[in-house]
Amino acid sequence: MLPYTNVGEIPESIRLILPEEGQEIYMNAYNSAHDQYEHSSEDRIDGKADERDEGAQIAAWDAVRERYKKGPDGKWHEK
């Protein structure tokens, strides 16, 4: 998956459970991690796009968890 240019490109399943600020955090963390993986020499040589996407998703959710927690309603709420 390519980096996001706006929160509207984040999958709907994520947009539905994260507040607007959480979506921004997710997008920025995803893009940053994706960029780091993209520029690693090993990734360019091996072409590990799936691993890059998975790593970026993990980094994005880790960033969200720093400020939000998942509530009993399945949505994420500020801590």
Image (cartoon, rainbow, N blue to C red):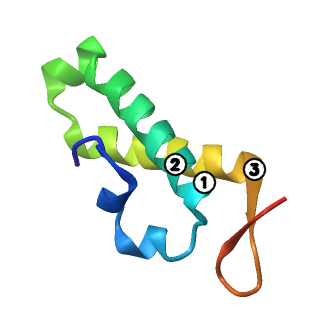
Q: Is residue 70 above or below residue 59?
A: below
The residue where tag 3 is placed is 67
Q: Which one is closest to the eye, mark 3 or mark 2?
A: 2
Is 42 in front, or is 4? 4
> Which amino acid, by three-letter code, is at mark 3?
Arg
Image marks 3 and 1: residues in contact by CB distance under 8 Å: yes
Label 3: few (<14), some or many (≥20) within 10 Å?
some
The residue that appears at 64% across and 51% down in the rendered structure is 64
Q: Position of residue 69 (x, y in %)?
A: 76, 63
Q: Label 1: which residue?
A: 21
**Residue furthest bottom as drawn:** 73
- Residue pushed farthest right? 79
Q: Residue furthest top?
A: 41
Q: Position of residue 56 (x, y in %)?
A: 42, 41
Q: Which residue is mark 2?
A: 24
**Image quadrant in which you'd find residue 20:** bottom right
Amino acid residing under circle 1: Glu
Distance (Cα) linking label 2 and label 1: 5 Å
